[in-house]
Image (cartoon, grey):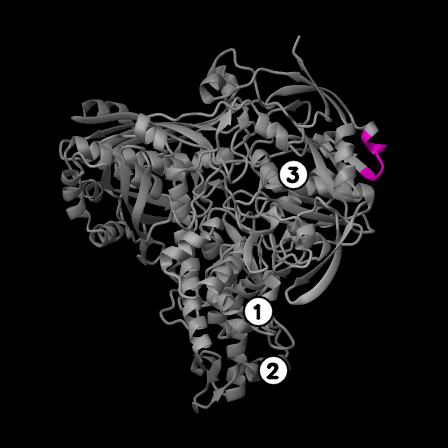
């Protein structure tokens, strides 16, 4: 049911975590210190691909101050983990597959002792050929990276982890018969999450053999599940408490789970608390990235620009371990041809193994890559038929009742047209598209303006059952305690849950405290991913709060001696037939006297949908968010430098629950999109990451972000709390392709490879630093020659 | 371990004496020795501003200052800018504008902004952006931070003129 009047939801509100974060009191995982806490140092692989022929940690254990050393042998099944494909390890087993992969961890009383311990470990590595890129991975003679049987194994391409497909008719004959055709390949880079908090965990052993893990993770329940499995403990012996998390963007899953299991094992072995905090360099070298992609787009359209069919094939560089790229690829497949109607579409997304670090979740989760490419392709078709890019989109976008590119019918309100029209009008698009080319003749600085739009499937979709659990309790002092199995790593989810509970209960937000997610107090709600917290976690909160609200209404009716339906609410007040208001505390106290139990559990689940992964057909998502973004640029033709001058953004995210939070997500997403489009690229040469800190890996600063004019189009979503949808991921999607389209408008150069660095804009290709690993080896501790790691060539 | 140096400094208005190793950064001293963990480590090479503190009136990356250099100096960290039981106007405006999300960069931004307003009470938007370009934020897109600083400057100017 949609509520039309609200007291706190949709209104200006303060973040519940604001004061502690503004005064320095908020504790992140790396801020904890407990008595007896040990520190750790890791022995990490200095080369991209090798067999481990010998690993001897006995000398390390004799180093004064060293209390324990662990390797893969210390975990059940050698610490194998990974979902959906279990190809990863808590510490490298038998082989190392990327530079920086952990081989052994030392726990010691201080950093010097730990470092000496690492230097005492003897490791022999037999070098294997390195797969540096996706072309090499596909060669018949390529060394096989994974130790699991892949989908590609059956076809003689074992480095193809799997292929996610969409089958919606047969586009080939339609494209062949189309008067307008496009066949272009686009490329996107590895992107670093660059959360400002480097990873940190702290594990504390209990006398009964259980362990508490404080972690900067995204999904404490997934963390607990993996840790328990590899430690050989039942899940109730592992308690994961999420500390305040300093940003994640998809980046604090697998890597933090490895750290959690490592420190938990060391804590149990030593019976001492064990902390592990990454340096920035360690974070960038060791943690996973957004996959790099190549996407070939084939489109057919009629002479008027009406799209007919699309055949899209994508290759994702998943690196050494498949991690969530298997699912990223699925989401990419579901969006490959964009928010348009077609007669037929097929999509194929291949996940490849290479020795380039590894890839996993990152904001947008495959759709960022898809939108970056298809939205350039749409502009290229528009030009062929001499259509304005926005007119081209308006002619082809999906609306309510249309079939999406996967063939499923869209049964929801669609605000995409309104988004495109808003950005068109606000940006003065038509005039600028007309006038900029005329002004650009012989100019050193050239102006351009470009657009992109998108759709983004909500929640997990076909990836899994999409549910959450919340609890609510009115405490003895009439404050309200909430838990939620979905977490807040900076997104504002706890504030959204607070506002929803406040509104449903009729209780001031100041009364409400949302606990940090702790696996012993919250109820498992699956992973906190896919921007699903507001809709799914929000609905679970709503369900729990409605149970209490109903009890309070009964209590008030009893107090007023009237029927429950006669009780009215005005913020905290209860009003009976005699119109004399009674306050919240009086009603709560009365409810208690009546013996009501003022605590409740709410569970909520999105309707189950079905996607057939084998056939590539079905319904991928219950609904979509939509948006359109326009970027205006100035290009310096002498240097190739692109400056974003202004950005306009309109997003259909349904009802906005927490406006300040939603705009924060939007501006933040746009800024990450700006980085993705203009400057961010993890440069991996011969398996080594070159840019390992913020002096080389450049993210946008306050000087790079132009004025942003943004709005929300609130097309209500019938399943969302108050009609809400999600915002976190979609906010970044359109910026990079809009930039590429704007640069084309300014210069006439179509650069099909992101990011749009000065070299690419000026020369048409990137200039790569031919780093052979000096940077990485330095930060992995190999610079002083004290590591006892012997590298030999395979016989 | 060995060779620790005794250092006397004034931190957030309090005279303190601490022992530190000659190679320890001021950031390490603040966090590990004095347990003032509001100052954060984001990069440890002077690029992100999360560890910014004010040292004798000058904004510094505490990761690039040695602990022993604090001898005789006055240091202001995020823990020291609010009045008792209250908030500094910058903190207040960061809350009002929702100018923080994950919050890990927030102490550095607030300290940097304070250093700016101490020297230049009425900065333009461009000046704020330029000054804060040494602080990285990955969540907010900076817009709300810039608004919060400009708004705080207005409030502080009114307070001064009272």
Q: Which residue is mark 2?
A: A589
**Span highlighted in magenta in the image:** A60-67
Residue that numbered label 1 is attached to: B82
Q: Residues within 10 Å of mark 1 (few under 14, many from 20)?
A: some
Question: Which is in the foreground here, disc 1 or disc 3?
Answer: 1
The residue lying at 41 percent from left, 70 percent from top is: B154
- Answer yes or no: do the residues labelled 1 and 3 have beta carbons within 8 Å? no
Q: Are marks 1 and 3 on the same chain?
A: no
Label pair 3/2, CB-CB below 8 angstroms? no
The quadrant where residue A766 appears: top left
Which element carries disc 3, helix, strand or loop?
helix
For the residues labelled 3 and 2, the Cα–Cα distance comes to 48 Å
A518 horizontally vs A497: left or right: right
Pick the residue in front: B60 or A681: B60
Q: Which image quadrant for residue A255?
A: top right
Chain letter of the residue beneath label 1 in the structure image:
B
| Mark 3 vs mark 2: in front | 3
Q: Residue at x 65, y 26 (%)?
A: A45
Task: Say whether disc 3 or disc 2 marks the residue closer to the N-terminus.
Answer: 3
* Chain label for disc 3: A
The answer for which chain carries disc 2 is: A
The location of residue B108, given as percent across then percent down, is 54, 55
């Amino acid at each position: 049911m949609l509520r039309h009047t609200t007291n706190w939801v949709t209104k200006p509100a303060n973040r519940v975590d604001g004061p502690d974060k503004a005064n320095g009191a908020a504790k992140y995982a790396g801020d904890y210190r407990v008595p007896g806490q040990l520190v750790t140092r890791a022995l990490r692989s200095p080369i991209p691909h090798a067999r481990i022929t010998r690993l001897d940690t006995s000398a390390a254990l004799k180093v004064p101050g060293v209390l324990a050393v662990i390797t893969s042998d210390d975990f059940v099944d050698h610490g194998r983990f990974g979902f959906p494909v279990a190809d990863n390890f808590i510490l490298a087993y038998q082989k190392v597959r990327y530079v920086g992969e952990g081989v052994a961890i030392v726990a010691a009383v201080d950093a010097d002792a730990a470092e000496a311990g690492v230097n005492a470990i003897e490791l022999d590595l037999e070098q294997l050929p390195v797969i540096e890129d996706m072309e090499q991975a596909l060669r018949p003679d390529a060394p096989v990276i994974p130790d699991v049987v892949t989908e590609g194994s059956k076809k003689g391409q074992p480095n193809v982890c799997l292929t996610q497909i969409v089958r919606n008719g047969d586009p080939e004959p339609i494209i062949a018969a189309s008067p307008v055709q496009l066949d272009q390949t686009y490329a996107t880079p590895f992107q670093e999450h660059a959360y400002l908090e480097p990873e940190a965990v702290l594990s504390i052993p209990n006398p009964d053999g259980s362990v508490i893990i404080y972690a900067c993770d995204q999904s404490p329940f997934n963390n607990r599940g993996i840790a328990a499995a590899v430690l050989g403990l039942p899940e109730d012996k592992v308690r994961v408490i999420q500390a305040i998390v300093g940003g994640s963007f998809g980046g604090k899953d697998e890597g933090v789970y490895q750290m959690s299991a490592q420190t938990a094992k060391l804590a149990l072995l030593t019976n001492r608390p064990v902390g592990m905090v990454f340096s920035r360099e360690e974070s960038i070298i060791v943690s996973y990235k957004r996959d790099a992609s190549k996407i070939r787009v084939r489109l057919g359209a009629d002479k008027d620009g009406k799209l007919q069919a699309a055949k899209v094939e994508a290759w994702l560089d998943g690196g050494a371990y498949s991690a969530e790229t298997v699912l990223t690829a699925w989401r990419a497949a579901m969006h490959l041809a964009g928010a348009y109607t077609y007669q037929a579409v097929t999509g194929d997304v291949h996940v490849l193994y290479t020795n380039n670090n590894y890839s996993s979740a990152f904001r947008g989760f495959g759709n960022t890559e898809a939108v970056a490419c298809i939205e350039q392709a749409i502009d290229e078709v528009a030009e062929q038929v001499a259509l304005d890019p926005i007119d081209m989109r308006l002619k082809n976008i999906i609306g309510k009742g249309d079939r999406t590119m996967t063939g499923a019918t869209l049964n929801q309100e669609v605000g995409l047209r309104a988004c495109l029209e808003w950005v068109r009008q606000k940006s003065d698009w038509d005039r600028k598209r007309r006038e900029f080319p005329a002004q650009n003749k012989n100019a050193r600085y050239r102006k351009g303006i470009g657009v992109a739009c998108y759709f983004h499937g909500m929640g997990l979709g076909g990836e899994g059952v999409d549910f959450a659990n919340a609890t609510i309790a009115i405490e003895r002092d009439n404050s309200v305690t909430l838990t939620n199995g979905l977490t807040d790593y900076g997104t504002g989810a706890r504030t959204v849950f607070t506002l929803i509970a406040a509104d449903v209960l009729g209780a001031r937000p100041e009364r409400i405290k949302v606990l940090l997610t702790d696996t012993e107090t919250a109820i498992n709600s699956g992973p906190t991913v896919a921007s699903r917290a507001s809709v799914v976690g929000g609905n679970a909160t709503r369900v729990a709060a409605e149970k209490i609200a109903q009890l309070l209404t009964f209590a008030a009716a009893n107090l007023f001696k009237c029927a429950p339906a006669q009780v009215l609410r005005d913020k905290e007040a209860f009003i009976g037939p005699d119109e004399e208001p009674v306050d919240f505390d009086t009603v709560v106290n009365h409810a208690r006297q009546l013996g009501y139990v003022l605590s409740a559990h709410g569970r909520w689940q999105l309707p189950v949908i079905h996607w057939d992964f084998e056939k590539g057909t079905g319904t991928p998502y219950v609904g979509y968010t939509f948006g359109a973004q326009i970027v205006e640029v100035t290009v310096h033709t002498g240097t190739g430098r692109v400056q974003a001058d202004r950005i306009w953004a309109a997003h259909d995210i349904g009802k906005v629950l927490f406006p300040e939070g939603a705009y924060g997500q939007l501006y933040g997403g746009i800024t990450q999109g700006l980085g993705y489009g203009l400057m961010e690229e993890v440069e991996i040469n011969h398996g080594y990451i070159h840019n390992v800190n913020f002096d080389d890996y450049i993210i946008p600063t306050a000087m790079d972000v132009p004025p942003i004019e943004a709005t929300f189009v609130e097309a209500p979503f019938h399943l969302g709390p108050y009609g809400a949808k999600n915002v976190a991921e979609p906010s970044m999607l359109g910026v990079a392709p809009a930039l590429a389209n704007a640069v084309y408008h300014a210069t006439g150069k179509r650069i099909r490879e992101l990011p749009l660095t000065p070299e690419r804009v000026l020369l048409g290709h990137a200039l790569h630093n031919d780093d052979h690993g000096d940077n990485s080896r330095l930060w992995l501790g190999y610079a002083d020659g004290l590591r006892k790691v012997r590298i030999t060539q395979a016989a | 371990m060995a060779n620790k140096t005794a250092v006397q400094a004034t931190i957030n208005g309090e005279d303190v004496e601490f022992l530190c190793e000659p190679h320890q950064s001021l950031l390490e001293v603040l966090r590990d020795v004095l347990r003032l963990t509001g100052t954060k480590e984001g990069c440890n090479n002077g690029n992100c501003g999360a560890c910014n503190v004010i040292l004798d009136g000058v904004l510094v990356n505490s990761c690039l200052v040695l602990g022993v250099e604090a001898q005789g100096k006055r240091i202001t960290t995020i823990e020291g800018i609010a009045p008792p039981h209250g908030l500094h106007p910058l903190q207040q405006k960061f809350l009002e504008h929702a100018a923080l999300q994950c919050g890990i960069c927030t102490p550095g931004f607030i300290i940097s902004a304070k250093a700016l307003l101490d020297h230049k009470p009425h900065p333009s938007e461009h000046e704020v952006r330029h000054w804060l370009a040494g602080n990285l934020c990955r969540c907010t897109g900076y817009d709300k931070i810039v608004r919060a600083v400009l708004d705080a400057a207005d409030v502080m100017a009114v307070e001064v003129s009272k």
